[in-house]
Image (cartoon, rainbow, N blue to C red):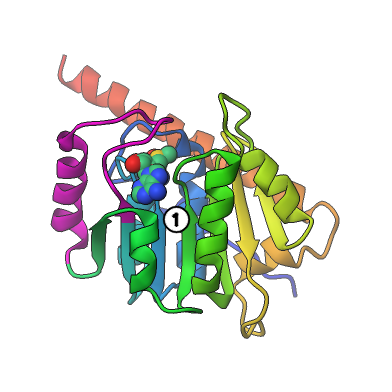
């Protein structure tokens, strides 16, 4: 009998923390990959206003996952985001305390400084979304890959962004040739990499769809699904806003 996978983002996800970010196109997948992996340890490199990070945290909480989450960022900005002021950290910190107290921690420091706080082979889900030159992404990957558990997942944002001096796309092209990967090309692109090893016998259906597609069109169907899921989320938000505006006269 074929089982049907109904992603939790479709059933119940309404983002609690909406801020402007090009990560907006990947919110349903971000929510679902956390629910699928049930990480004991999740680390994000590059948080800014928290759109991706708080999507992960929301999924941890709503799917009752017992794990720890760490957001690493100087919260000062870089040459791509531009330098930003203290209000950014303050808003992220407030939201974090209000909703994710006790399992989510902000590490206000350089990625390189945070490295020493994590053991090798310990991170279940790592999201790399810092500075986006080819050199910076390659360095973040080289530094942090040893920290990821065998069988663990690394997400890379902006793998389809060919703007300014962004080079994540070039890094990703090279990486796909050497690793087990899946690529979402919509929005600015999201790369999913799986580290070899780990026990895969009880893999969640989403992981099977990502890495063990049984039919040739499995990948295309999954990509199309998440394009629609993010459009649906956006339309739901717009409708809610319009209904509110109408009610307020
Ligand atoms: C593209 S933004 C992150 C976007 C975020 N993930 C979202 O959902 O919108 C990149 C962030 O990485 C931070 N950053 C870049 N390089 C860094 C480094 N070496 N150490 C610490 N933070 C860094 C910047 O301060 C910036 O806030």
Q: Going 22% across and 19% down the picture, which residue do you hit?
A: 245
| Relative vertical location of residue 223 with respect to residue 122 in this rendering, above or below | above
Q: Is 150 left, or right, of 96 in this rendering?
A: right
Residue 168 is at least partly visible in this image: yes
Extreme residue in the right direction: 216
Quadrant position of ligand 1:
top left
Q: How many marks?
A: 1
The magenta stretch spans residue 82: yes
Q: Between residue 26 and residue 222, name the one nearer to us.
A: 26
Q: Which residue is mark 1?
A: 31
Residue 8 is at least partly visible in this image: no
Q: Is 108 left, or right, of 40 in this rendering?
A: left
Q: Between residue 248 and residue 168, name the one nearer to us.
A: 168
Q: Is 213 left, or right, of 20 in this rendering?
A: right
Q: Secondary structure at mark 1?
A: helix
Q: Between residue 97 and residue 215, name the one nearer to us.
A: 97
Q: Quadrant of the C terminus?
A: top left
Residue 149 at x, y percent in the picture: 53, 77
Q: Going 44% across and 45% down the picture, which residue do you hit?
A: 130
User: Residues in magenta?
Assistant: 72-101
| Relative vertical location of residue 37 with respect to residue 77 in this rendering, above or below | below
Q: Is 184 left, or right, of 12 in this rendering?
A: right
Residue 136 at x, y percent in the picture: 52, 46
């Amino acid at each position: 009998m074929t089982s049907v996978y109904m992603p939790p983002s479709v059933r119940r996800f309404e983002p609690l923390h909406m801020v402007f970010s090009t990560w907006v196109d990947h919110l349903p997948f971000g929510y679902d990959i956390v629910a699928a992996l049930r990480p004991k340890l999740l680390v994000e490199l590059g948080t800014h206003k928290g759109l991706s990070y708080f999507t992960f945290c929301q999924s941890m909480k709503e799917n009752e996952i017992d794990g720890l989450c760490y957001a690493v960022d100087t919260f000062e900005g870089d040459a791509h985001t531009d330098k930003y002021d203290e209000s950014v950290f303050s808003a992220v910190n407030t939201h974090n305390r209000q909703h994710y107290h006790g399992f989510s921690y902000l590490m206000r420091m350089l990625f390189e400084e945070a490295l020493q706080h994590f053991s090798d082979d310990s991170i279940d889900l790592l999201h790399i979304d810092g500075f986006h030159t080819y050199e910076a992404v390659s360095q973040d990957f080289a530094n942090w890959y040893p920290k990821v558990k065998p069988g663990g997942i690394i997400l890379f944002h902006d793998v389809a962004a060919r703007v300014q001096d962004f080079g994540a796309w070039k890094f990703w092209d090279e990486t796909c040739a050497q690793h087990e990967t899946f690529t979402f090309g919509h929005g600015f692109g999201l790369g999913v990499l799986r580290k070899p090893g780990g026990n895969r016998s009880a893999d969640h259906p989403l992981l099977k769809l990502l890495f063990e597609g049984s039919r040739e069109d499995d990948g295309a169907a999954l990509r199309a699904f998440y394009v629609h899921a993010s459009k649906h989320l956006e339309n739901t938000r717009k409708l809610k806003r319009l209904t509110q505006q109408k009610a307020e006269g």
